[in-house]
Amino acid sequence: MEKMEEENLKEETAEEVVEETAEDTRGEAKGQTEEGENPEAAEETEEKQSKKDKKKKKEKPEELLKQKIAELEDKSIRQLAEFENFRNRTEKEKQAMFEVGARSVVEKILPVVDNFERGLSTVPEEEKGSAFAEGMNMIYKQLLGELDKLGVKPIEAVGKEFDPNLHNAVMQVASDEFESGIVAQELQKGYTYRDTVVRHSMVSVVE
C-alpha cells in the first residue's frame, strides 16, 4: 500500500514538473514574440529605407553632374575670355611692330625724296621738257603718291605759325612779308606718318 502511494506521489510530481516546463516554454515563446519586432513591419521598414537609400544614391550623381557641368562652363568662359584678351594683345603688339617697321622704312625713303627734289630743282629751264627730266619728274610724283597712300604727308611750314611739335627752327630772319613767329623759309621738308611726326621741318622763323 505504501509503495502504491509513493508511486502515485511520484507520478503527480512528474506531471507537475512537465506542466511547469510547458508553461515556461510557452511563456518564453510569448515573451520573445512580444519583445521581437513584427516581421511584416520590419520588412516594410526595410523596404522604405531601401527606397530612401536608392533615392539618395540617385540624387547624388545628378547633383555632382550639375556641379561638374557648372565648373566646366565657368572654365570654358574663362578660357574664352583669356583667349580673347590674348588675341587682342597680340593684335596690338603686331600692329605696333608694323608701325615701327613702317616708320623706319619711311625714314629711310625720305632722303631719296630729298635727292629727287634737289636733282629736279637743278634742271636748267631749257631742259625741263626733255624726256629725261619728264621721266625723273614722273618717278618723283609716283614715289610721293605711294607715300601718300601709306599715310605719309608733308608738313606745311612756310607762312604758318611756328609749332615746336612740327617745326625745328635753326635760325631767325627779318622779313617784311611775314609777322614775328611765322615760318619764313623751309630748309628741309618735314613729314608725318599717320598723324605722328616722322621728321620735323627744318625752318627759319621771323624774328
Image (spheres, helix red, strand yellow):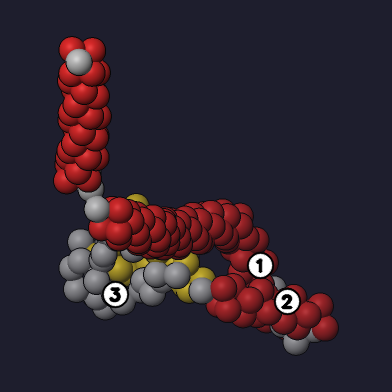
Residue 188's spot in the image, x, y percent?
47, 61
Query: Label 1 belongs to which residue?
Result: 116
Query: Looking at the rendering, in which quadrant would you find the N terminus?
Result: top left
Q: For this rendering, which residue is in front, 81 or 103?
A: 81
Residue type, numbered disc 2: Ile
Residue 101's spot in the image, x, y percent?
57, 55
Residue 124 can be seen, yes or no: no
Residue at image position (38%, 58%) is 54
The circle drawn on residue 160 is 3
User: Which badge, 1 or 3, is on the more N-terminal residue?
Assistant: 1
Q: Are marks 1 and 2 in contact (CB under 8 Å)?
A: yes
- Using a 10 Å C-alpha cutoff, classify the residue at mark 2 as few (fewer than 14 neighbours), some (14 to 19) or many (20 or more): few
User: Alpha-carbon distance for marks 1 and 3?
Assistant: 25 Å
Residue 89's spot in the image, x, y percent?
45, 56
Query: Looking at the rendering, in which quadrant would you find the C terminus?
Result: bottom left
Nearest-to-viewer mark from 1 and 2: 2
Residue at image position (81%, 78%) is 132
The circle drawn on residue 139 is 2
Examine the rendered structure and indicate whether residue 77 appears above or below residue 139: above
Residue 9's spot in the image, x, y percent?
18, 20
Nearest-to-viewer mark from 2 and 3: 2
